[in-house]
Image (tube, helix red, strand yellow):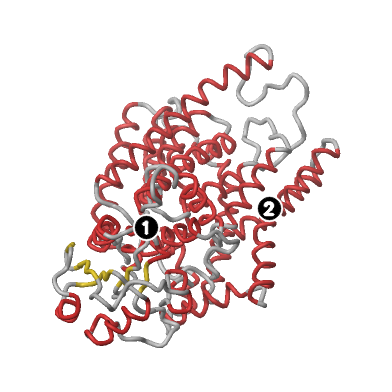
Amino acid sequence: MLQPAPAPGRAAGGARGAGSPERGATASAAPFARDLALVVLAKAAVSALVLALGFRAVSDDDFARVVLAQAWAHAPRLDPTGTSWLPAPFWLNGALFCVLGRIVAPTLEVARAVAFALGLASVALVYVSARWITGDRRAALAGALLAGAFPWSACLGVATVPELPTAALSLFAVASLLTPPAGPAPPAGRALFGALALVIATLSRYEPWPVAVIFAAMALLAAARLGQGRAAQAKLALASLVALAGPAAWVAWNRVAHGDALHFLARVASYRNAVSPGGDGTLLRLFAYPAAMVREEPELFLSPVALALVAWRARRGAAPGEARPFPPLLRAARPYALPGAVAALQIAALSLALVRDGAPTHHPERATLLALLLLALAVGDLSARAFRGSPSGARRALGGALLVVLFLGVFFRPHLRREHFNPRTDEVAIGRAAAALTPPSAPVLVEVVDYGHLATLAALGRPESAHPDRSIDPRDPPVRSSFDDPAPLARRVADVGAAYLVGRVRPSVIDLAGPPLATRGAWGLWAAPAGRGAPPPATPESRASGPAEATP
C-alpha cells in the first residue's frame, strides 16, 4: 500500500545509478516501451491463433451485446437495454459504431475487430499493473505474457464481451495503490487513475463492485497513514469517492427509472430462478467460483505445485555448504499477497451473491478473471525466476514438471469443462446473406428457435428493422413459433409488415413463401409473399421481444 514518500536522493522506480532524474527516466522508459510492445504483439499473436482455430463466441450473450450496441448506435439512450445489463460496454461499442459508420457498417466483423483491439489494450493494462505490483521489469514481462495467453484470457481477448477489459481495469486499480518491494511509494495521484478505471469497470460488469469497495477502504487507509502533505491525502480521499461513483450512479438510476434502487438484482434473481428453478444447494453455490477456476484453468493451479515440488527436491538433494540450488520463490511471491487477498474477497462476495441468486447464470469462471490474471502473473513471474536462478539440473527438472502440467491440462480440460463455446456458424451466415441481399431498411421477420437468432441479428447489422417472431424469455409464458404453420406465419408477416423472412428451411415456410432466395446450412432467406408484407413500418409495440428482453 502507499507509504511515505522516499527521501531526497532515493532511487526512483528502477533508475538506480542513472544519474539525473531526467536521464534516469529516459533510461527506464525505453525498456518499458519495448516490453510493453512485446506483450501487446504476443497478445495479438495469441488472439490471431484463437481466431484461426475457429473460436468466435463464448455464448449467445456475445451476439446479444453486439445487437444492443448496434441498436444504441441507431438510437442512443442513457440506459441502452433497460435491463440489468450495465451500460458502459454499449456506450463504447455504440459510439465506435457511430464514428466508424461513416466508413463501414456496424457489422459483426467490426464488433469483433473492436474486441480484438480491446484485448490488446487489456493486456497492456495488465503489464502496467504487473510493473506496479512487482517493481521488476523481467517479472512483469514474464507474468504479463502468461496472463495474455492462458485459455480464458485468450478467448475473452477476441470475444465481444467485456470481461477481460473489466478484469484488467480492476487489476490496474488495485495495483495503483500498491508499493513494490523495492519502492518507491507510488504518487498519490496514481490512485485517481485507478479510481477512474474502476468507474468504467463497475459500469461494465458487477464483479468489480466488491473491488471498488475494497479500493475505497484501502485509499482512505492510505490517506490516514500517509506521511505527506494534505494535497496527497485529498487525492486519496477523492479517489475513494470516485471509485464508488459507478455503483452509486447505477443504483440511483434504477431508483429513478424503475422505482427500485435494487431493481437489477431482482431482475437477475428472477431470470436465474426461471432458468433453473431448483438450483444447486447452498454449499455447491458457495464453492462454485473456486471450483470453476480450478476446472477451467487447471494448469495455473498445478504449476505452483510443480514449482514447489521441484524446489523441495532440489534443496533436499543439495550437499551441505553447496550454493543454493533454487531461488527463494516464497519471498518473490509476497508482492502478490495483497492483490490476491482483494481477489479472494471479491470471490467471497460473488459466492454470497450466488447463494442469493444475484450472480451470472452461466460460465462463472468469467467473473473470476481478476484472480486468474493475478495467478497467471505470479506463475509467470515465479517460473521465470526459477529458470534464471537455478542450476542446469534443476532447470531440466522444472521444465519437465511444467511439460507434465501442460500435458495433464490439455488431456483433462475437455473432460472438466461443463459449458462449451457456440459459434452459431449457420445463423451468422444467413444473417450476412440477408444483409447482402435485402435493402437496408427492409423489415425482416426472424424465426426464434433458441437464442441463436441473436447471431443472425448481429450479422444482419440493423436490429431496428429486424423482428424476432416470438419471445423465449423463460420469465414469459411459452409461445409457439409462427414459423411452425403457414397461417400463423402469414398473420405475423402482416402484423410486422415484413418484406423478408429468415428461418429454417421447412415445408411450413416454403408453402407460404416458395423457394428460398438463399440458404446457409439449415437456414434460409425468403421474400415475403406479395401483399402480405412490406410497410407500414412496425412500431415498438408491434414488435416481438428483442435482444434486451432476453437478458437478465
Q: Nearer the viewer, residue 63 or 213?
A: 63
- Residue sitting farthest toward the right: 230
Total number of numbered discs in the rendering: 2
Let me know if residue 167 appears in the view: no
Numbered badge on residue 461: 1
Going 29% across and 62% down the picture, which residue do you hit?
422
Measured as percent of width and height from the top left, residue 152 is found at 38, 52
Image-quadrant location for residue 514: bottom left
Question: Label 2 belongs to which residue?
Answer: 243
**Horizontal placement of 188 versus 280: left or right?**
right
Query: Can see residue 151?
Result: yes
543 or 298: nearer the viewer: 543
Indicate the secondary structure of the residue bearing disc 2.
helix
Is the residue marked by circle 1 packed among few (<14), some (14-19), or many (20+) residues within 10 Å? Answer: many
Task: Please give left or right for residue 482 compared with residue 523 in the image.
Answer: right
Residue 436: x and y in percent read: 27, 55
The x, y position of residue 287, in whole percent, is: 47, 68
Residue at left 71%, top 40%? Answer: 2
Residue 30 x, y percent position in the rendering: 52, 20
Q: Indicate whether 496 appears above or below 55.
A: below
The kind of residue on which mark 2 rests is: Ala
The answer to which of marks 1 and 2 sits earlier in the sequence is 2
Which corner quadrant of the image does residue 56 belong to? bottom left
Few, some or many residues within 10 Å of mark 2 (<14, 14–19, 20+):
many
In the foreground, 446 or 150: 446
Asked whether disc 1 touches disc 2, contact meaning CB atoms under 8 Å apart, the reply is no
Taking the spot 62% from the left edge, 20% from the top edge, the residue there is: 25
* Among the 4 quarters of the image, the one containing residue 214: bottom right
